[in-house]
Amino acid sequence: MLACVIHGPGDLRVEELPVPQPGPGRALVAVGYGGVCGSDLHYWRHGGVGDFLLREPMVLGHEVVGTVVALGDGAAGPVPGTEVAVHPASPCGRCPECAQGRRNVCRDTRYLGSAARFPHVQGGFAARLVVPAEQLRPLPGGLEPRRAALAEPLSVALHAVRRAGDVAGRHVLVTGAGPIGCLVVAAAKAAGAAHVTVTDLLPAALEYARAAGADTLVRADDPDDSGWPAAADAVDTAIEASGVAAGLDTCLRLVRRGGVVVQLGMLPPGPSPFAGNLVVSREIELRGAFRFDGEFDEALALLAAGPGFDALVSAVVPVREAEAAFVLAGDRGRSCKVLLDFAS
Ligand SMILES: [Zn+2]
Ligand SMILES: [Zn+2]
């Protein structure tokens, strides 16, 4: 079977690997599509993401949909032939975070295609994938697999909005209009946000945010852009989805006194400049958002109901051309979410 393996910075290979067999409790899935994520791009460009560094070759990919092929002994899961989305996380269930219901920050989780632990957890950019059967979710009726491939990043966005608290009737600012920022826009609107303003450097990226439901688009590099919130207290909640320190700065400067800022984008490793005095003098609540847990089922339901999400899938590329897909996914002027096609 073909798989997309990262060996080091800039060294992405499409390789033949043996087809895995499902052991007890596990399922074999024929992967249909896999979404290229910002973290996959980080492994490819830098050999790591945040503080997680590559120490051995790893199959990338954690945004995966496909069809169940076989179940191992005792596996309780969707029967062979069922179209499924794969929840990429299996938390340990034993650590204090799991016990407190914060399974997304489990200290011993296994997450597809992640170098956070060693040996790394191999990912889902492969024509056949074995995962614990309980990680499979049947696609709701009528949900196309291509759109369903957005379930993982949409879950991330839903979790970030949940971390922000109640946004119904509120003005939400989102910095960064990459795939995650666009899905945060959609998640905020679904949660009842009255107005969503999005900032980015690239006009093309902002157009994807418009398709996701943004009300106001702002060029982050244009201080005279008429879209900047006029009043100092106009923004109730800000969600940082660009992963650069300037985005966090924008959030801290524009959110109202006592407002909430959620850091979702993964900042570069090491210390970041940070307008901490604003957190103090305005009593801003700064919260992190990392991955997700139960939001995955919510994401699938939202995708099934929302044909507008299709506009965010900007290209589908055969796995043999994985490197071209990565180049495209890394060029935000030309793409939003790029999918690898493993079935063709
Ligand atoms: Zn992702
Ligand atoms: Zn745990």
Image (cartoon, rainbow, N blue to C red):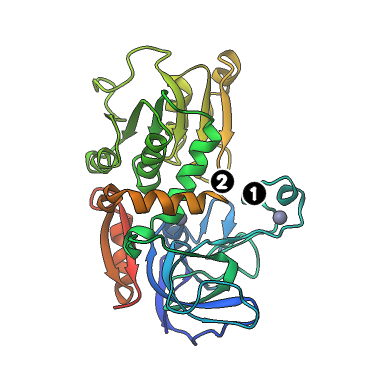
Q: Is residue 254 above or below residue 190?
A: above
Residue 144's spot in the image, x, y percent?
32, 62
Residue at 55%, 14% (x, y): give it. 282
* Disc 1 target residue: 105
* Disc 2 target residue: 290
In-front residue for pair 111/303: 303
Judge the density around disc 1: few (<14), some (14-19), many (≥20) Cα neighbours within 10 Å: some
Residue at 45%, 35% (x, y): give it. 240
In-front residue for pair 203/163: 163
The answer to which quarter of the image holds residue 235 is top left
Q: CA distance from mark 1 to mark 2?
A: 7 Å
Residue at 53%, 25% (x, y): give it. 260
Report the side of 327 relative to 109 (left or right): left
Q: Quadrant of ligand 2?
A: bottom right
Residue 137's spot in the image, x, y percent?
49, 63
Task: Name the outermost residue toward the bottom.
Answer: 18
Residue 12's spot in the image, x, y percent?
41, 71
In-front residue for pair 269/169: 169
Are discs 1 and 2 less than 8 Å apart at CB? Answer: yes
Residue at 47%, 26% (x, y): give it. 237
The secondary structure type at the circle numbered 2 is loop
Q: Is residue 241 above or below residue 41?
A: above
Report the side of 105 relative to 272 (left or right): right
Q: Earlier in the sequence, mark 1 or mark 2?
A: 1
In-front residue for pair 304/293: 304
**Camera sees residue 271:** yes
